[in-house]
Amino acid sequence: MSGDHLGLLHKELPNMEIVILDDADTIGQVAAEEICVLLGSKPDAVLGLATGSSPLSIYDHLAARHAAGEVTFARAQAFTLDEYVGLGPDHPERYRNVIDRSFTSLVDLPPGAVHSPDGLAADIPAACAAYERAIAEAGGVDLQILGIGTDGHIGFNEPGSSLASRTRIKTLTRATRSDNARFFKGDLDSVPTHCLTQGLATIMAARHVVLVATGPGKALAVQELVEGPVSAMWPATVLQHHPHVSVLLDESAASRLQLADYYRETYRGKPPWQGL
Ligand code: F6R
């Protein structure tokens, strides 16, 4: 089969691609390359940013490539996925501060180009509606970076979330709060109980979704995401309906996948020009 036919198969038809790589650093490198290519062809691209540990290596690679003069974000915009409710403006774990520290302050995104849900808003429903409007007015998200919770959440869409949900307030599960207690000196009581999060339908509207998972703790959620039935009980499974998803995994996060060898073979057989 010719390269052109392969291109059609992999890029232009709806696809969830599973890419199993050696380690978090390689995952960061591959995702950062995709983002640099996007910004090269669309300098005013809209990026969707996740917080948490999973995307850190992507941000490190992007910051390094920016410092090396290889990529500019000067015309780009960014929207974060979610925010805790009630953490003060200077709280180090407020997601807006976390993303500034780990990424946006390290590149040349202009002031005002980074948007996040307002977890301190007096009128929460109005703030959520304003966030949806802002994403739409920016032209929608071109590339959305995602992590995945051990309970299968994306953004903070916990199990039972409506597959049609939009930005709204959610109650965090005890599992998510205890996963995140590591950022709050191990103190579960300091982890907020509520958050604002883009909904599953909001995330599904992004044109390309790049989901990153590493470590054995994510293996079950990844198995459900890729090979399980679509269900609100594993919210990430809604991505099986998305036309362009790249799932970047290390070996341990991929360890429960029944078709892991097939995914490896498919990725190895891709033409080099294809990207994700
Ligand atoms: C963070 C977010 C969450 C995390 C998920 C995984 O903005 O939306 O869905 O991506 O909880 O977190 P880590 O990457 O810390 O394991």
Image: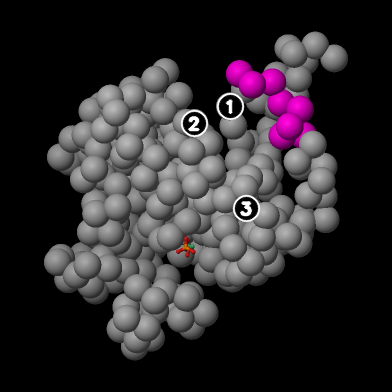
Give the labeled residue for mark 3: 250
Task: Name which residue lies at 67% across and 46% down.
Answer: 20
Amino acid type of the residue that numbered disc 3 sits on in the rendered structure: Asp
| Residue 169 vertical position relative to residue 101 in the rendered view, above or below | below
Task: Name which residue lies at 59% across and 32% down.
Answer: 276
Q: Which comes before the other along the chain, label 2 or label 3?
A: 2
Displayed quadrant of residue 196: bottom left
Q: Where is residue 227 in the image (x, y as percent from the top left)?
A: 77, 55
Task: Name which residue lies at 33% across and 24% down.
Answer: 70
**Number of numbered discs present?**
3
| Magenta span | 266-273
Q: Where is residue 184 in the image (x, y as percent from the top left)?
A: 32, 78
Circles 2 and 1: CB atoms closer than 8 Å: yes
Tell me if residue 270 is in the magenta stretch.
yes
Q: Which comes before the other along the chain, label 1 or label 3?
A: 3
Can residue 247 be spotted in the picture?
A: no
Q: How far apart are marks 1 and 3 (CA)?
A: 18 Å
Give the labeled residue for mark 2: 34
Lateral position of residue 53 relative to residue 1, left or right: left
